[in-house]
Image (cartoon, helix red, strand yellow):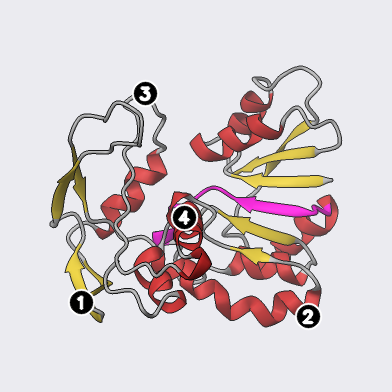
Amino acid sequence: MNIIIVGGYGTFGGRLARLIAHHAHLNIYIAGRSIRRATLFCDTLPAGTNASALAFDRNASPADLHTVLTRIAPDILVDASGPFQVYGEQPYGLLEACLNAGVNYIDLSDGAQFTAGVAQFNALALRKGVFAISGVSTCPALTSAMVAHLSADGVEVHDVIAGIAPSPFAGVGENVIRAIASYAGKKIPLRRNHTSSHAYALTETMRATIAPAGELPLTNRHFSLVDVPDLTLMAQHYPHLNSI
């Protein structure tokens, strides 16, 4: 199986590459605009890993993208580059190129507008017999899985409050900081009191103590409102929710 990881030498793309490096049946292409960084990253992977550096610009023309995809013939392309909030005038160029080439597509988008817009390609994906999955990130993938789990067996969830509190030792990519900075102070849609509303990113805050059952609680943490796909997509899938 051939897998292209766009942004494969970055924080999240690199983590993904290391997680799958031990699978001998995978040919992993570490892709990005810097062939030097991609090559250096490949050298850090365990011996025996089937990994190759690939010069790849996700913003290239449709013809150039098609040429690369046809030459490599990947089974799956993972876009782990970002920031998805600032993907320019044609944010879905790579996604559309993948579908047209018959390549399965996954991205790690945490951008609300970008992730919501992927639904418009459902018909094309079905016609080509491949999938396009967006938002394979903490929000909305893990948060949605948790709400689905809690909603099982007829249990009705009324309010959803989710937060990310990374360890101080966790690597946070530069593009994550760019993504957050891109919408700081801007109006973002959300649901409150069972109606559509809005608030301003990073200006609303709350404090919470994360306390898993049977474990010592973390110290009280300061959380700020951020723009994630959950704020709009979860309201569509769970119309009975009072607030998100």
* Image: magenta residue range: 73-86
| CB-based contact (under 8 Å), mark 1 and mark 4 | no
Looking at the picture, which amino acid does disc 3 mark? Phe
Q: Label 4: which residue?
A: 146
Q: Is residue 10 above or below residue 123?
A: above
Q: Label 2: which residue?
A: 127
Q: CA distance from mark 3 to mark 4?
A: 25 Å
Q: Nearer the viewer, residue 222 or 240?
A: 240
Pointer 1 or 4: first along the chain: 4
Q: Are there few (<14), some (14-19), or many (20+) residues within 10 Å of tag 3?
A: few
Q: Locate the N terminus by quadrant.
A: top right
Tag on residue 169?
Answer: 3
Q: Nearer the viewer, mark 2 or mark 4?
A: 4
> Splitting the image into 4 quarters, where does residue 51 fall?
top right
Q: Is residue 20 left or right of residue 205?
A: right
Residue at screen point 37% across, 23% down: 169
Q: CA distance from mark 2 to mark 1?
A: 40 Å
Instruction: Give how far across and how far down residue 167 sits, in percent.
Output: 34, 29
Q: Label 1: which residue?
A: 193
**Which SS class for mark 2?**
helix
Residue at screen point 43% across, 78% down: 236
